[in-house]
Image: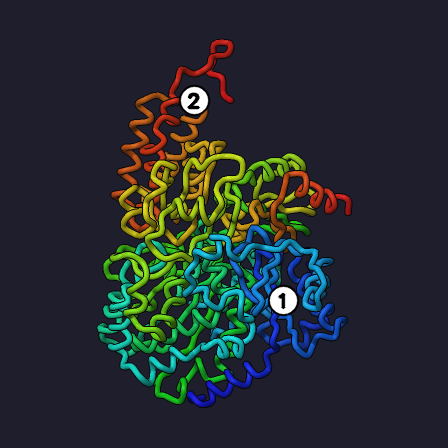
Amino acid sequence: MDLTELIDVAEAHRAKQKNIRIHCCTSTGCRAASALEVLKNLKTAVEDEALGENVEVVGVGCMGFCGRGPLVQIDPDDALYEEVKPEEAASIIGSLKGGTATALKGDVQHPFFARQVKIVRQHSGKVDPESIEDYIAAGGYRSLYKAIYELSPPEVVDEITRSGLRGRGGGGYPTGLKWATVAKMPGDQKYVICNGDEGDPGAFMDRSVLESDPHLVLEGMAIAGYAIGANHGFIYVRAEYPLAIQRLQKAIQQAKKYGLLGSQIFESPFDFKVDIRIGAGAFVCGEETALIQSIEGGRGNPRPRPPYPAQAGLWKCPTLINNVETFANISAIIREGADWYAGIGTEKSKGTKIFALTGKIRNNGLIEVPMGITLREIVEEMGGGVPDGEVKAVQTGGPSGGCIPASLLDTPVDYDSLVAIGSMMGSGGMVVMDQDTNMVEVAQFYMEFCRGETCGKCIPCRTGTVQLYALLTKLLKRQATQADLDKLEALCHMVQETSLCGLGMSAPNPILSTLRYFNQEYTELLQAPKYLNGKVAVE
Amino acid sequence: MQSPTTTKQSKAASAKEHPSGDRRFKTLDMTMKRYQYKPDALIEVLHKAQESFGYLEEDVLTYIARGLKLPLSKVYGTATFYHLFSLKPNGAHTCVVCLGTACYVKGSNKVAEELEKELGIKMGETTADGQISLMAARCIGACGIAPAVVFDGTVAGKQEPEMALTKVKEWEAE
């Protein structure tokens, strides 16, 4: 395939598209609310009303407002229907002919939608994730062409560096620097790995990106391969995301058929193939060295760094590992240029970030916002606040992050500000908690998680998480003394400083941040235990 | 689960065939062949084995170890490391309760407790009659519709304890 052919495919497909497109979300969340039936009924209704000339019904990816699924949107009218029931589908089609739709109409001007800046999710909810033609018609794979024919590999790396993009997996390592390191490494065989092992409970943006726009990630990976000189990529996806795996498999096949992946892409000497590796349920595999072990077919045990994967990664070859969302940003940066991207966000955190806004909040779902927006704007304006209550804390960064109290809601959301207040950006989970949530129980919940997910290789993490959990349990049973509380804090620091990998190093964060901001809840538990028949009463 | 097919086919089959005559070993062998018997393919092969056998019995692990020329200890070590691989058979129905943060905040632990009470088993166990397995998931990424429960592979959102109980009772009545 060359550029003219790509443009031909795009134009031919655009010509085939009908004037009115009815988008129905078919992602995991909406599927659970019978979106597939809604889709079927919409299609039947179009046939029944004989509107097939002008109207087509398309199953699309996630539109973001997952708490109110299934969602149906009419393009170009921009009408949005929420919580559509299968029996309401016909009335939506009827509304095109002047009827009234009985389905609940959403407000597209609501800050939840209006405040979003969509770069990664630009096609999400608009293109059919199972059709490469849809993606090409939306301008897809043009960035890959541009990279190969208009830029040299160092220029691509330079473009990414100048854009200021930082790793979206949570650490925030500058992406351009990582690419440059791998590009400079000697050796003929290099690998690109896409980390789709989204393990943080409460985060689902990577699932959504993979389900809604798999080609965007593949294109980003191919550009990375070109830039660093790799010809083979792996995409590691959790087994818990069957739909994402299925759509990726389809996307890879389609791209191969069009010669957009495989050998001699766009008839250039550049080869790049992508294989999927399916995880088997281990949180630690989100850590890069553990992920590499897992791709190599072994237990997901991390190993000490250095050497970093950039120097010796998969099968000891230089390896580039980036998160799904990071790769999904690449195409836009190459298309629009580094300066455009660097103009969005804050000084040190560029671009946008997708957050999964969940928990005790009115508007549940995925939002893509520019860096630097405050937590208050996200939670109160976009999220609509807590139903019947007040925000007590916002948890970001999953088991590696911390709980931010309501008093700090004016903190801007960027990598450094969140670290400064004892939390972290993490992969993008944002769980809102209200007054009913007991913060010590939350800390215990996360420690239970880490205790179960530690790989057991290094002692501080293996034993430390068990001991921390035991101390928290003792506290919650009101059997702890001040000495236990002191021990809890000391042990947190010990585990943090001596663990081998990120899992252990960050496991105590939920405890430390709740100790810092909700200390009273801990000390209240220290009050004299209740006695019953001379024994400590255990609740 | 299908019962192992016996003698007749094994006569005709190649030397590769498993002595029990179970045809599923042949599928497993095809998977290993596709990966050129590379030890790196261990996890893919284990996935396939679990898919066709339902769980990983000792015989299967030994067969994989021989095929990929790996020590059995490595195969066993890998199979036990990952939560998804099961060395025991699962029930006819599986009920997976998501205990991720978003679900937890919205009360999924209550759903889990009620289910444990109803079935008389703990998370990760199977009822004595082999009908229902109860499992916990760390996060299935359906946080927007928390709390979520997966019944036999189908995700159900916004679950109240009663809703989950009704579904499980249906299975029990079967």
**Residue at point 68% right, 42% down?**
B163
Above/below status of A186 relative to A69? below
Please state which of residues A40 and A319 is positioned toward the viewer in this rendering: A40
**Residue at point 25% right, 43% down?**
A497
Quadrant of residue A322 in the image?
bottom left
Q: Position of residue A16 (x, y in %)?
A: 59, 82
Q: Position of residue B22 (x, y in %)?
A: 65, 66
Q: Secondary structure at mark 2?
A: loop
Q: Which mark is residue B24?
A: 1
Determine which residue is flagged by label 2.
A478
Residue mark closest to the camera, 1 vs 2: 2
Image-based side of B132 in relation to A511, left or right: right
Above/below status of A239 relative to A510? below
Q: Is residue A498 visible?
A: yes
Subunit bearing disc 2: A
Q: Secondary structure at mark 1?
A: helix
